[in-house]
Image (cartoon, grey):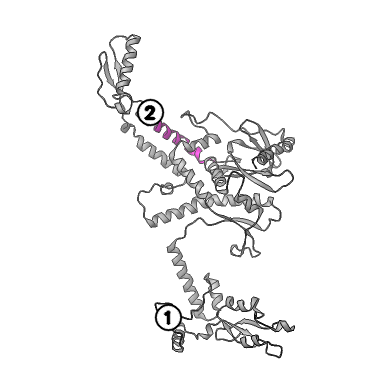
Amino acid sequence: MARSFLGSLANAAGTLRTRTTELPVPFTGRTASYGAFAGPRRDAEGQMRAMTAVGTLFAIVDRTANATALVDWKLYRKAKSGKREDRTEVTAHAALDLWARPNAFMPRQEFVETFQQHFDLTGEAWWVIARHARSSMPLELWPVRPDRMTPVPDRDQFLSGYIYTSPDGEQVPLELDQVIQLRRPNPLDPYRGLSPVLSILPDLDTSRYAAEWSRAFFMNSAEPGGIIEVPSPLSDEEFDELRDRWNEQHKGVQNAHRVAILEHGTWKDRTISQRDMQFVELRGATADRVREAYGISKTAIGDFEDINRASALAAKSWFAEQQTVPRLERIKGALNNELLPMFPRSEDLEFDYEPPTPPDPEIEAQQLTARANAAKALADAGLWDADDILSAVGLPEMRRAATLAGPAAVPVTDAWQESVAGLLGEDIENAQRWVVKAVGDDNTCDPCRENDGRTYRNRADAYKDYPGGQGYIHCVGAEHGNPCRCKVVKRGRKGQSE
């Protein structure tokens, strides 16, 4: 599989080079790397390296990428009505298999988490599509680092293709149908995405410098800090001896704040405490700036100061609605608008994700109460069938109980039925909403004749004996060449057949 991906890139070079040889490749703006705090990088590679530089940024990107990757996906066939609830699930399809296993080395979760990290750090995510040489159907999806992809603008068609720069520096042209790009729109560049990291680069540098200063303080500080003044120049041997003795007695955390004894010099205090520099507050302010750039609260990355069950549930729901759902919608758009059309006969198919928002028990209880009240109001009006009322208000069909469940069984007597009927405001027999109608002639078989007039509580029960509403499953007329002519019909509220 890996060879097919590399082979796809190599095959693409032969076709696209002939069309884009003279096209300019946009400058990617590469500069020095994020070394040991050597300064900020504004290019894509520097933005990705920033994830490991500040803990708050790592936590945000890791949390959002994980949440996005854990959501389940399904493939549906669209309904003619256009309603989501009328869709039918497709459980076997090449596109579904590809999305479940994008390539031989990555399951879907790792694939999604990888390109989502790219997106959250650089504002871009790239999928490179691998195909067989004799087929146009996608076989593999690979996440590619944004710093290695370059769009090739076109004066007439907006975009001619892409240039992939391999780790060894080779530039491989790619066709438009070999690449899918997800991006956060950039107001200054329609071809590239916009990274939140760019808005907080100074804050990230400040935090990193503060962390490095603190580390250096504990590793290298020789308290008491200051300057040693000597009345006369020292020879090399005396200078080396003074330096070595000083480091031996005062350098390192274990020797901090030891009393200094000087034989040939005067100590000049130059100490600046960490309290004066307020490094703790400085790093806390940087964390706030990072969260602001990504629009994420403290609780979303596990910083719980004052929280209870209700606020925790609200925070979880907010994170799903404001952070996870927008990312899923962007992925769904790429799947349905770019990937699915590459498969034959996929016009009526669509990917969709399982809602990541956790259910709110309080809201669900309020909705159930509202639906029950609406059903009661419609039933009291006496103008609609019970099954239609339940369907209209979004409640499932319910069967009228013949006995009461409890510690002891209650016998179904005439007095009990009259009592329940009085509570319900209608006769028990009228609760049987479906009735059998048999044609009574010489060709009617005995099972159909005996079942004539039988009632059922709902359509599901009736259709078990009369599939599709007509033809008794126990009819024996077909054995004599007479097809069954019995059927079940819905009854009116007072028992009359409709």
Q: Nearer the viewer, residue 15 or 413?
A: 413
Question: Label for residue 135?
Answer: none
Residue 122 percent coordinates (x, y):
54, 40
Q: Secondary structure at mark 1?
A: loop
> How many residues crowd mark 2 within 10 Å: few (<14), some (14–19), many (20+)?
few
Could one spot residue 71 in this view of the protein? yes
Magenta: main secondary structure: helix
Q: Residue at x 72, y 33 (%)?
A: 21
Q: Are marks 1 and 2 in contact (CB under 8 Å)?
A: no
Question: Label for residue 216?
Answer: 2
* Residue, disc 1: 409
Q: Is residue 231 magenta?
A: no
Q: Secondary structure at mark 2?
A: helix
| Alpha carbon distance from label 1 to label 2 | 79 Å
Q: Residue at x 35, y 38 (%)?
A: 281
Could one spot residue 482 in this view of the protein? no
Which three-letter amino acid code belongs to the residue tagged 2?
A: Ala
Q: Is residue 213 left or right of residue 44?
A: left
Mark toward the start of the polypeptide (1 vs 2): 2
Residue 213 percent coordinates (x, y):
38, 30
Which three-letter amino acid code belongs to the residue tagged 1?
A: Ala
Magenta highlight range: 194-215
Q: Quadrant of the N terminus?
A: top right
Image height check: is 82 above or below 487? above
Q: Residue at x 52, y 86 (%)?
A: 429
Image height check: is 380 above or below 138? below
Quarter occupied by residue 231:
top left
**Residue depth check, mark 1 versus mark 2: number of the one nearer the observer:** 1
Residue at the front extreme?
479
